[in-house]
Image: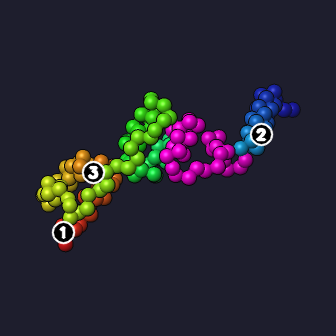
Amino acid sequence: MVSTPLIVVAVVSLIVAAWWVSRLGERGPGRSPHDSSQPPLSPSPESVRVLLARGEKIQAIKMLRTISGLGLKEAHDAIEAMQRGGLGALPVLTPSLPVAPEEMNPEIERLVATGQVIEAIKLYRELTGAGLKESKDAVDLIRVRSQK
């Protein structure tokens, strides 16, 4: 004879399985509940506004980084500013372009030559407005070129 607790567990399991299958059918296989049924947007300032209007803040930050070259913090701050000020004009999309090595600030070259790489990266960021990764890559390039 089958015990009552075993029957209850079986019924609950069937109900949960049926619910899960019905939810999967709504989204289709392989799709998360956060996937949007909207077609992907091409990178543009208007796409950033659309994503933000949809409430897709993380996607808006990613899109802004793609079209502007901003670092993560700068893009996050820009999106936050857009949210506070409405969905009007985007903040400046193009950070200062990295300085060519031949035009590099002598202080950065001195810092690199003396092994003060972190200070050189900080100064490069201040002078160019580049993100952390871009600044590190630029300082690494300066270091390699100065070793030749």
Kindly identify the amino acid type of the residue bearing the numbered disc 1. Answer: Gln
Where is residue 72 shown, x and y percent of the image? 40, 45
In the rendered view, tell whether residue 43 sits above or below residue 85: below
Which image quadrant is residue 17 in?
Answer: top right
Where is residue 98 shown, x and y percent of the image? 29, 56
Residue drawn at the location 74% of the way across and 41% of the way down: 26
- Outermost residue to the bottom: 148
Task: Please tell me how crowded label 2 is: few (under 14), some (14-19), or many (20+) other residues with Cα within 10 Å.
Answer: few
- The Cα–Cα distance between marks 3 and 1, rounded to whole angstroms, is 23 Å
Q: Which mark is residue 128?
A: 3
Task: Tell me which numbered mark, 1 or 2, is placed earlier along the sequence.
Answer: 2
Which image quadrant is residue 4 in?
Answer: top right
Q: Is residue 18 left or right of residue 46?
A: right
Task: Write the start and end of the magenta stretch as one range.
Answer: 28-57
Task: Tell me which numbered mark, 3 or 2, is placed earlier along the sequence.
Answer: 2
- The Cα–Cα distance between marks 3 and 2, rounded to whole angstroms, is 53 Å
Residue drawn at the location 56% of the way across and 41% of the way down: 50
Where is residue 91 shown, x and y percent of the image? 41, 40
Kindly identify the amino acid type of the residue bearing the numbered disc 2. Answer: Ser
Disc 2 designates what residue? 22
Q: Which mark is residue 147?
A: 1
- Outermost residue to the top: 4
User: In the picture, which quadrant includes the C terminus?
Assistant: bottom left
**Pointers 1 and 2 in contact (C-beta within 8 Å):** no
* Foreground: disc 3 or disc 1: 3
Give yes or no for residue 137 being in the magenta stretch.
Answer: no
Residue drawn at the location 77% of the way across and 39% of the way down: 22
In the rendered view, tell whether residue 54 sits above or below residue 121: above
- Of residues 40 and 8, which is closer to you in this image? 40
Per the image, label 1 sits on a secondary structure element best described as helix
